[in-house]
Amino acid sequence: MAFNTPEQYNTHLAESLTKIELNEYFKAYHQQFCPTQDITFMEYFLELCHHKHEFCVPHIKLFEYGIMVKCASTDVLRRLKSLELKNDEDFELRKVSELRNQGGTSNKTIYMLKPSAFELMSKYTQDTIRRRSRVLFFE
């Protein structure tokens, strides 16, 4: 069935009491209303939806989605501070031990961003075209 607007599609689903998985909804929505839009980033977010109470985004995704040019933890910390985001409120800090090539281990800092922090940081991306497509799906 074809719909002219997303609102008509959503109303049809609600009124017909259609039970649909989130990933099926996004695929159908994408296909019908914005087939040329790049939504490859959505796969990651759909995967996160299956982890109840664990919706935190690792800071490496800021680099992968073009939100930040560098993904070093010091650069991420600088950006978090500039936006006045706080540890345990807006993000979680994790220390991960890694084996070094020359032997021994080193500790790596990973910032796990809560959705509001990730969204705030994505609003300040240098790649405005990709940011715009992300913001459309957040809303």
Image (tube, grey):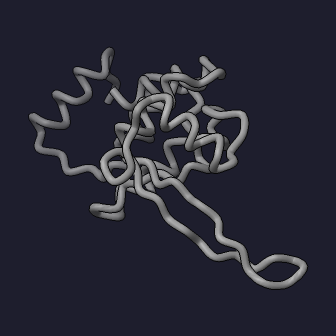
Residue located at (42% from left, 51% from top): 46
Q: Does the image show residue 31?
A: no
Q: Does the image show residue 4?
A: yes
Relative height, residue 66 to residue 71 (above, below): above
Relative height, residue 92 to residue 86 (above, below): below
Q: Position of residue 130 (x, y in %)?
A: 60, 25
How many numbered marks, from 0 up?
A: 0
* Quadrant including the N terminus: top left
Q: Position of residue 83 (x, y in %)?
A: 45, 29
Relative height, residue 91 to residue 123 (above, below): below
* Quadrant including the C terminus: top left
Q: Quadrant of residue 101?
A: bottom right
Q: Is residue 17 left or right of residue 133?
A: left
Q: Is residue 21 left or right of residue 78?
A: left
Judge by depth and name the residue closer to the eye, 119 or 93.
93
Q: Position of residue 30 (x, y in %)?
A: 46, 32
Residue located at (31% from left, 53% from top): 21
Residue located at (48% from left, 36% from top): 81
Q: Is residue 119 left or right of residue 61?
A: left
Relative height, residue 122 to residue 95 (above, below): above
